[in-house]
Image (cartoon, helix red, strand yellow):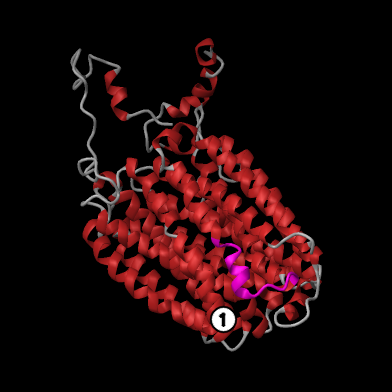
Amino acid sequence: MSLPRQRGREATDDTEGAPRPGVRPTEPTDPNDHGGQGVLGRAHRALSVGIVSVIVLIAFEATAVGTAMPVAARELDGVALYAFAFSAYFTTSLFGMVVSGQWADRRGPSAPFAWGILAFAGGLVLSGTAGGMWPFLLGRAVQGLGGGLVIVALYVVIARAYPERLRPALMAALAAGWILPSVVGPLAAGLVTEHLGWRWVFLGIPLLVLAPLALALPRIRRRVAGPGSAADGGDTRAPLDRRRVRLALAVSVGAGLLQYAAQDRRLIALLPAAAGLALLVPSVRGLLPPGTLRAARGLPSVVLLRGVAAGSFVVAESFVPLMLVTQRGLSPTSAGLSLAAGGLTWALGSWLQARPATEPHRERLMTLGMLLVAAAVAAAPCVLVEAVPAVTLAVAWAFGCFGMGLVISSTSVLLLKLSAPGETGRDSAALQISDGLANILLLAGAGVAFATLGGGAVGHAVGGHSASRPGAFLAVFLPMAAVALAGAWLTRRLVPPAPTARALPGTVAARTGDRTGAERASDRTPEARV
């Protein structure tokens, strides 16, 4: 980790401005650190409540929509496109994330936040009124665009409005925002789905948008409405980086082509697959920090780990309600509630990583977290055996969510710590791109495996007799467990190497772990070995 900037000046007494012997140098002050107040102190309380209210809305949407999705897919005759219902959201969110990062760094986060909330609500309305699966997917795509704008804007707000010491606690508060939706969301969505229909789940959530918009937007405008200061790299005159916007568009189109090809098992599907890869690979390399794809130490591995962790877990979780409803005959309400305890344990894991005493052990806790995720995902398909109680999955998932709480919040904390001044939006977008792109690619792969092994036939199980396809679900969960295990290895590469740790915060070396030939040569000296 980077040493404080002040230490570089303490080393030489003959430099202008060097501290006098016996006089402790003054630590640089953070204008956002109001007298050591916490996230709920007077200076931060209103903004903290507003930010958490937005996360509560997103959490409620995720848990409620996930509960209603199996019924919606069956009624729209689209179970074969079930994975698309989730990946369509992530595909367009990639474009929204890059645009939001550019927009927030140059003009401030309030505009992308407001437009993102409106698009998020509009997409829900489109899906709720859809007459077929493809219009339904269009609504999910619009919703994803809004979600991408919102989440990156919030990261920029956190980076600018809160001192570094408060960010772990705020991340824990955001995780705690999932507790109530995780319990209430599945129950409410299940009851609405069973008694009124799945459409009212989608059409009811937009009404909840008004509260977080009214709470958060005025405070964001008041605290961080414009670009950052000169030290933060903000410049209202700077135009959007059109190259990055084009790369983001190429990523979204490429990911969409891959998803389309994944659902078509004819030989001709190789053409859109090849076109998707041709667009995706170079664009991803241009949007992510250098060294991400080879897991370079430091920020690149943090970004890569986020995708590995989120992708493996989200893909598995997307198929849990479908598995419980179709293979074990649970109602949508019961299937949704099986994941409810996960909101509490996720928040518990996030709270643990925010404790000052755990800071020196952050990387080890993240390793533990990924191992718990891998174990939970691997254990989930045990409920395909009739003799295994369905509650077994709920217990396993609670442990997996605890691991995710340790990992996801920690990747956010590390990213904000390693980001250079003025690049918080760009790096936050990279983190979310890794998250969303991993979800898309892994969902596409899981969708192919699921459909190939007869997963489409399970759609007739809702309200009827189950078409048992255990192999289709095993082809989803076991590969995702292997991906999560790879994430446990990645947690060993989050700290930049020792010479990089001496670099000033915000330099390229501090962020990527790249070293010069002289620095690498210094590793071979006796002093370096000591």
Q: Mark 1 highlights which residue?
A: 193
Which one is nearer the viewer's eye here, 175 or 213?
A: 175
| Above/below status of 192 relative to 244 | below
Within 10 angstroms of label 1, few (less than 14), some, or many (20 or more) residues? many
**Left/right of residue 25 with respect to residue 405 in the rendered view:** left
Residue located 45% across and 66% down the image: 58
Residue located 54% across and 55% down the image: 435
Q: Is residue 442 magenta?
A: no
Residue 340: image location, x then y, percent:
55, 62
Q: Is residue 336 magenta?
A: yes
**Amino acid at pointer 1:** Thr
**Left/right of residue 236 with respect to residue 424 in the rendered view:** left
**Left/right of residue 473 with respect to residue 86 in the rendered view:** right
Q: Circle 1 — which element?
A: helix
**Quadrant of the drawing holding the N terminus:** top left
* Residue 377 appears in the figure: yes
Residue 284: image location, x then y, percent:
56, 54
Instruction: Give the quadrant of residue 31.
Output: top left
Residue 455: image location, x then y, percent:
76, 71
Residue located 39% across and 36% down the image: 356
Instruction: Give the quadrant of residue 5.
Output: top left
**Left/right of residue 476 with respect to residue 185 in the rendered view:** right
Residue 518: image location, x then y, percent:
50, 22
Instruction: Give the quadrant of residue 176.
Output: bottom left
The stretch in magenta equals 327-340
